[in-house]
Image (cartoon, rainbow, N blue to C red):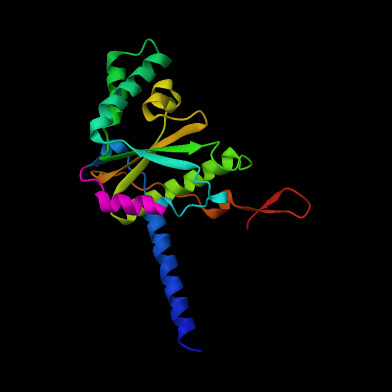
Amino acid sequence: MNILAEPAQALADKDMAALAAALMQSRQTILPKRLAEPGPDRKQLGLILDAAATAPDHGQILPWRFVRVPQAARARLAEVFGAALVERDAAATLEQVAQAREKAHRSPLLLLAIVDGQRGDPDIDLFERIVSAGCAVQNMLLMATALGYGSALTSGKALKSAGLRTLFGLAPGEHALCFVSIGTVQSRKLARLRPAPGDFASTLSPDGGTVAGF
C-alpha cells in the first residue's frame, strides 16, 4: 500500500472542491442584451452539452432536450414573440411589438430547453423531470462560465404560445421551460449578494416541523 497515496488524494480532493466552489461562485447572470460575439464554437458547444448529460436522470429516460436557434432562424422566432404579445395584449404598440421581436436576436448562442412529461416511465413525476432539466441547465451554465462566457436564462409568456409550440415542433407532452443564452460578456452588473445557508436550510425536528440551523 502506498502511504503517500492517501495524503495526495486528499489534497487533490481539496483542490477540486476549491475549484468547484470558485466556479459556482463566479457564475453570474448576464442579460442577453449584454452578450455578444463570439459565442462558443462547435467544440465548446459540445463541452457545454456534455455537461448537461451529467445531470441526474432517474430511470435514464432523458426527459429533456435542447434546440439551438441559429441566426438564420431568429427572424421566425421574432415573429412568434411579436405575435404572442399581440395575442396577449391587442393594445400593444408597434414599439412594444418591435421590442418583443428584438429579443429573438440577442446573444450569439440561443437554446430552448424542453422537458417531456410523457417520455419513458410514466411513474416518474413531471416535477422530477423538471428538476433533472434544471440540473442539466445549471451544468451548462457552469461549463459556459468555465469556458469564459457569460450566460442567462430567460422565460416569458411566449413560451406557452401556440406559435412557439408549432415553431419548435413540441409534442403534446412537452413543455418549453426557458431559453439559454450564452456569449461574450460586454458589460456586467455588480454580483448580487448570495443567500447564506441559514437563509434556506433547516433541520427536521423529531417532533415534526423544522428548526433553524443545520
Q: Main secondary structure of the magenta part?
A: helix
Q: Quadrant of residue 99?
A: top left
Outermost residue on the left side: it is: 37
Identify which residue, 65 or 214, lies in the foreground. Answer: 65
**From the viewer's perspective, is residue 138 above or below residue 72?**
below
Position of 204 with respect to 191 (left or right) is right
How many numbered discs, if any? Answer: 0
**From the viewer's perspective, is residue 140 above or below residue 16?**
above
Residue 172 visible here: yes
In percent of the image, x 27 and y 53: which residue is there? 43
In percent of the image, x 77 and y 55: which residue is there? 206
Position of 195 with respect to 158 (left or right) is right
* Image location (x, y in percent) of residue 84: 38, 19
Position of 86 with respect to 75 (left or right) is right
Question: From which residue to which does the magenta span run?
Answer: 37-51
**From the viewer's perspective, is residue 55 above or below residue 15?**
above
Residue 27 visible here: no
* Image location (x, y in percent) of residue 110: 31, 38
